[in-house]
Amino acid sequence: MNLVYINSANGLSKAALETVTYAKKLGADVAVVTNGNAAAELLATLGAYGASTVLQDAGVDGQDPSQLVKLVAAAAAKVGASTIIFSHDLIGKAVAPRLSVRLKAGLVAGAVALPEADGSTKVNVFSGKAFGYVKVNSAVRIISLLPNSIQPEQTGGNCSTEAFDSQAGSSAISVKATKKPEGAIPLPEAELVVSAGRGLKGPENWGMVEDLAAALGAATACSRPVADIGWRPHHEHVGQTGVAIRPNLYIAAGISGAIQHLAGVNGSKVIVVINTDAEAPFFKAADYGIVGDAFEVLPRFTEAVKRFRAAQH
Amino acid sequence: MNILVCISKAPDTTSKIAFTNGNTQFDENGVQYIVNPYDEWYALVRALELKEAQGGNVTIITVGTASDDAVIRKALAIGADDAIRIDALATDAYFVAMQIAEYAKGKGFDLILTGKETIDYNGSQVAGMIAEALELPYISIATKLDVAGSTISCEREIVGGMQEVEVQAPAVISCAKGMAEQRIPNMRGIMAARTKPLNVVAPAALEALTTFSTYSMPAAKSSVKLIDPNNLDELVALLHNEAKVI
Ligand SMILES: Cc1cc2nc3c(=O)[nH]c(=O)nc-3n(C[C@H](O)[C@H](O)[C@H](O)COP(=O)(O)OP(=O)(O)OC[C@H]3O[C@@H](n4cnc5c(N)ncnc54)[C@H](O)[C@@H]3O)c2cc1C
């Protein structure tokens, strides 16, 4: 049996559907364990992605990894899980390592593909500059799947939802405040990203970046110096010492393409670079390049996207 | 307040990444090692700030061989009081975390800090594993950290935003950008680091749970297609028809 942990407190994220699809593709039956009080009808839709049962503990709010680890361990014991899957998102990064110690089960952190024929699983290493193949030496294995590594796939099927009291105890972490920018797309999950660097000269010029992102339905990101000087919030900083992302499309305007920046974005499927300097190193990592001034190109790009979207409808 | 900061060595960010021995080993030839930036810039510097404000002691710990002593001295030069090196090759995250947990058990640390991940294996695993082994609360990917009495307040990243949380000490915290600013060691720090205690401790008998069987490099990118800056409709059409990403 494969067991998948998902957080359903805010609905079913794409990352959650990816993990269920991944578990299904591993073969064997798929059970899902979740916290929170999502509606049973919503959880039942996981059947289409390959789940056969969902265990739901409404008593666990999902804020404390030491509670979540007990929830997942109890579910693993109940279903006899041999592989346990998380998303390698902020919750998975906090809970999967705890579970590894609790079950003495090897963890593949940040898998980017299904396991190979020899049982090893591919992960990014050196911040995306290379790949490594991890072998787990224990009977039970844990895999956390890097978001955007596989696409959710509906194979059809039904699943039942069962209330599950995991006896996870109380939360040791008390939440004082939560800040979620309205409507913003979380960067690690975004399929399209518009990013800009020091070439934009100042925070007052970011309207062009946001306009293009809005026209595309993309998230925004930035280079490290831009976050360091405070032009943009830290959580937008991508690169080796920021967030590592692998969107389908990464558009970089006014970013030179330093090795540390590339390390966080070179898993992107397609890269578009806009830079005044034809010698900027980023062009070597780009699929499409525009040698030009971002101040002129970005607004034109936005208009072209709007024309394209209008023509589609 | 007694703070344990876990530090790891990591190859300098400009290192050439290559593998040897039939792609089974990282090629260390010519590689310069640094203190993992998250450990140094955020975990260590914030620990020092807390100590400077409230008193206490900052101990750094690493699992590694004698060749890692240079990296340890660098962290001492930034201002840590003393260092522990558990004398073993760091074989996987589980092995490292369990060694550190074995050492820290019963020593009364109020805070155990790590960086949010290392820039070589990027697993973000060690802190959570230490927390579980010691049965402590864990706040992951914190961007702010304050301590008042036994109450630890943090800001942490959550999916799509930020959250302010509190927990009672002792606790394990992994540290990220926002928490502190990098400190460049000065001459006095570098001199002092030479004589600060670096205690080498024998490892506990433990086995790794994972191994890297092989490595590979990503396929080389084909060369860039240049687009006329006056013809963005062409780019949009290519992104739709050729790249199929919009
Ligand atoms: C240990 C370490 C870790 C690091 N980690 C990261 C990291 O995680 N992420 C990261 O991004 N960086 C990181 N860096 C920094 C990195 O080395 C670069 O300094 C940084 O990425 C440069 O940012 P930038 O491209 O925005 O700025 P610059 O290098 O200043 O480049 C600006 C670019 O904009 C172009 N430009 C100027 N005007 C225009 C215009 N009008 N239109 C179009 N283009 C224009 C210029 O030609 C230039 O290429 C790290 C460095 C170190 C030492």
Image (cartoon, coloured by chain):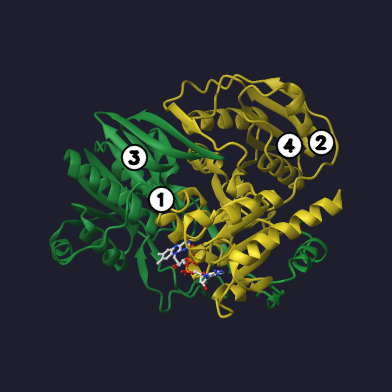
Chain colours: A yellow, B green
- In the image, which is nearer the foreground, mark 2 or mark 3? 3
In the rendered image, the vertical position of residue A65 relative to residue B178, given as above or below: above
Disc 1 marks a residue whose amino acid type is: Lys
Q: Which residue is mark 4?
A: A30
Q: Are marks 4 and 2 on the same chain?
A: yes
**Dot 3: element:** strand
Alpha carbons under labels 1 and 3: distance apart? 11 Å
Q: Chain of mark 3?
A: B
- Nearer the observer, B116 or A255: A255
**At which x and y percent is residue B7?**
34, 55
Q: Are marks 2 and 1 in contact (CB under 8 Å)?
A: no
Q: Which residue is mark 2?
A: A48
Disc 4 marks a residue whose amino acid type is: Val
* Dot label at residue B177: 1
Q: Residue at x 50, y 70 (%)?
A: A259
Q: Quadrant of residue B170?
A: top left
Q: Are marks 1 and 3 on the same chain?
A: yes
Residue B207 visible in this rendered orientation of the protein: no
Q: Chain of mark 1?
A: B
Quarter of the figure with the N terminus of chain B: top left
Q: Chain of mark 4?
A: A
> Would residue A140 be found to the left or right of residue B9 on screen?
right
Q: Are marks 2 and 3 on the same chain?
A: no
Q: Residues within 10 Å of mark 2 (few under 14, many from 20)?
A: some
